[in-house]
Image (cartoon, rainbow, N blue to C red):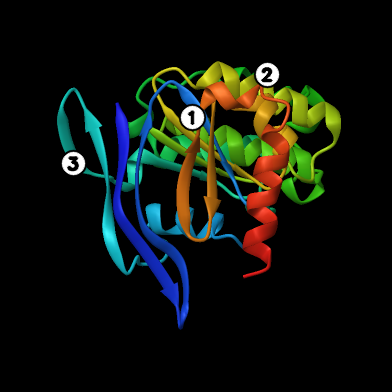
Amino acid sequence: MKCIMEHLSKSYGKKEVLRDITFTFEAGKIYGLLGRNGAGKTTLFNCVNRDIPADGGRCELEDQGVRRPLRPEDIGYVLSTPTVPEFLTGREFLKFFLDINRDAIGDPKPLDDYFDLMSIGPEDRDKLLKDYSHGMKNKMQMLVNIMARPNLLLLDEPLTSLDVVVAEEMKQLLRSLKDGRIILFSTHILDLALDLCDEIVLLSHGELEAVERAHLGQADFKAKILAALREESHE
């Protein structure tokens, strides 16, 4: 399975954020989308998810040689700032999500199995979401996207503000989920991308550029990436 972007473009006024992007992402890998703050990572995700209209181009899914447009059910989107219904408990939220997505999810697991997957303890499962920490809200946002089993998972800097223990748990979970799906993980933190991701893709000057795996171990690799990002900041 592949996600194929062709000639994707987006501008805000005179600022060209995405410049005729053509790129193919393959299932079974975590792609690190690396770029400075403001480079257009969130804009790219929003165009793929159709939260904002692209000015041109298209995104398609290819499976067993057959290509079709991406559908809403193909995409899971985890935001850097978690958005959850804070008036519900964690258990009520998962039950509600299962109820409205029962046809898509098919044969769901017991709710406590999902909580176990995210290391959310029994003492927290019936608390209101408004009383959850930022990290726990982020876990819940990640969890419902896992439950929906999307073909394409967009992660917009989801680990940036998490403590080290929760961040490590999330990284381990993502590694276990990559088989059979495409994961795009955006970040502006180079070391995080190198630690977690199978492939690195640089978003700079509105264009996507793959970093050859052979270059990842080179002593001057980080210096080259940082130089490219610094050059963009001085445009």
Asked if the residue under mark 1 is in contact with the one under mark 2, i.e. CB atoms within 8 Å, the reply is no
Quadrant where the image shows the N terminus: top left
Q: Quadrant of residue 63?
A: top left
Is label 3 in a helix, a strand or a loop? strand
Q: Residue 27: x and y, percent?
A: 38, 25
Residue drawn at (67%, 64%) of the image = 233
Which residue is disc 1 drawn over? 147
Callout 1 crowding tier (Cα within 10 Å): few <14, some 14–19, many ≥20: some
Q: Quadrant of the C terminus?
A: bottom right
Say which quarter of the image contains residue 4: top left
Inter-mark Cα distance, 2 to 1: 13 Å
Foreground mark, 3 or 1, reads 3
Residue occupying image coordinates x 43% and y 62%: 18
Label 2: which secondary element: helix
* Label whose residue precedes the other's in the sequence (2 or 3): 3
Does the image show residue 158? no
State the separation of the CA atoms marked 3 and 1.
Answer: 23 Å
Residue at 60% x, 36% y is: 142
**Kind of residue indicated by mark 2:** Asp
What is the number of the mark on residue 116? 2
- Nearer to me, 96 or 68: 68
Q: Which residue is mark 3?
A: 68
